[in-house]
Structure formats: C-alpha cells, structure tokens
Amino acid sequence: MLDPHLIAAVGGLLVGLLLTVFGGGGSVLATPWLLYAVGVADVHIAIGTSAAAVAVNAATGLAVQARAGRVKWPCASVFAIAGLAGSLLGAHLGKQVDGTHLVKWFAVAMIAIAVSMVIPRKSEGDPTVHLQPAMVLKLAPVGFLAGLAAGFFGIGGGFLIAPGLMASTGMTLANAAASSLVSVTLFGGATSASYAASGQIDWGLFAGLVAGGAGGAILGAPVSRWLAQRIVLARLGFAVFVVAVAVYILLR
C-alpha cells in the first residue's frame, strides 16, 4: 500500500498544476483528494489540512505577483481585512457542522466554482485604480462574505474574490487575480489556524500537499504554454471534471 504522504504529494502536484494553468479552482480538489485518495476519515481534518496548504501555495504565488507589480495593495488589503472576520466565523461554523453534512455542502460549492470557471470575464478595467472612500463601502461587505465562504468550506475563495475586487473597484482582471492572493493567503491562514487550534490538521499530509504543489507550479509553466491556444476548451474540461467529483461526493 502506498504511503499516504506520497499520495498527498501527488494530490498537491495536481492541485499546483491546475492552479498554475487555470489561475484558480484547483485548490477545491485538495479536500476530496485527502478524503477519497489518501483516506482521511475526518472531514474536518481534511478541510483544515487543505486550507493550510492553500495558504502556503497562495503566499508563494503572491510573492511572484508582488514582484511583478500587479497587486493593488490598498484595495486588496481592505478586502482581505474585512474578509478575515468572515473567514474566522466561517471556520467556526464549519467545525460545528457534522462532517457528513459538511462534505455535501462542499460538493455544492464545488459545482458553483466549476460554473464560475466557464463564465467569460471582461479583461477591461482601470490598471491605475486607486482606493477611494466609496470603494471601501463596497469592498468591506463583499470581502466579509467571501471570507465567510472560504472559512466555512476551507477553500481559497479566489472564484469569489477576483470578481468581487473587479466589481468593487473597476480594476483589471490581471490585477484582480493577483490582488486576490492577498485574501486567499489571509483567509487560508485564518481558517487553518482555527482548525489547528482544534487539533484538526494533519501536518504530515500538509507537508506532502505543499511539496507536491511546488512541483505542480513548476510543471504548470510549460503546460500553460502548450495549452495557450486551447485554454477555453481545457478550462471547460476541468470544470466538467470538478462537477463529476462533486456528483460523486453527493451520491456517496
């Protein structure tokens, strides 16, 4: 029988590859992988462990995007700080829900993420956007709700964060995708800290996911170039796969 930490690393490789190629959505597969491939029996441990790994992977991506100057720090910070309270509340609520019911809700969230992946998004926007007082009134509530969902399900929440940033500030898709990593890192860190405080993180499997994710990110660069002319079809195929996994969870 294969070592569970090795299986976790393979899952991390897959998640890291998908995140690099598609820019989001891949992290939602981490929890099902831990549950059904690795064999983690406790849903809450699977969610807590995957949230911790998502935070580390997002922080790595954030460092890259920050060096490239794509992160709109003032806007991203308001969104993330507002969402921090939401993520802590979401994690607390998630831990109160029976694992059998929580995993079903997680499957529903997977379907929502898959749908969001195939919705066309406008790339137009203001690349020079600056934080204005009126924006705070939009960023804060949207950030709180995104954090609540991220904390409850133990996911990065990028599928909510990037559109939320664009709608609240008018920034470009490229800036929103980069800036969303501030929130993904903070939400994942807060969620995993909440689960860690309850002893619901398997640190060995966490290490496997992170190590595999680093390899997936490296492998993802040439794959992205190869898929450049097929990205719409590839994204649709990935979305269908995520829905298939969600249906499998719902029917178990």
Image (spheres, rainbow, N blue to C red):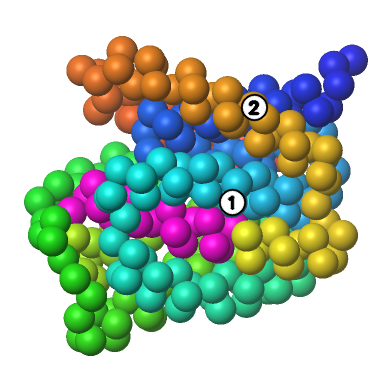
Percent coordinates x, y for residue 106 in the rendering: 60, 53
Residue 86 part of the magenta-drawn span: no
The prevailing secondary structure element of the residues shown in magenta is: helix
Residue 40, above or below 238: below
* Among the 4 quarters of the image, the one containing residue 48: bottom right
Quadrant, the N terminus: top right
Label 2 sits on a secondary structure element that is: helix
Q: Are marks 2 and 1 in contact (CB under 8 Å)?
A: no
Mark 1 crowd level (few <14, some 14–19, many ≥20, 10 Å Cα): many
> Which region of the structure is painted magenta?
172-188
Which numbered disc covers residue 55? Answer: 1
Residue 11, above or below 69: above
Residue 176 part of the magenta-drawn span: yes
* Among the 4 quarters of the image, the one containing residue 146: bottom left
| Residue found 32% across the figure and 71% down from its top | 74
Distance between mark 2 and mark 1 Cα atoms: 14 Å
Percent coordinates x, y for residue 70 in the rendering: 27, 50
Label 1 sits on a secondary structure element that is: helix
| Residue found 31% across the figure and 70% down from its top | 75
Quadrant, the C terminus: top right
Mark 1 residue type: Ala
* N-term mark: 2 or 1: 1
Can residue 110 be seen in the rendering of this structure? no
Residue wearing tag 2: 212
Can residue 78 be seen in the rendering of this structure? yes
Mark 2 crowd level (few <14, some 14–19, many ≥20, 10 Å Cα): many
Mark 2 residue type: Gly
| Residue found 32% across the figure and 55% down from its top | 71
Looking at this view, is 212 or 1 the one in front? Answer: 212
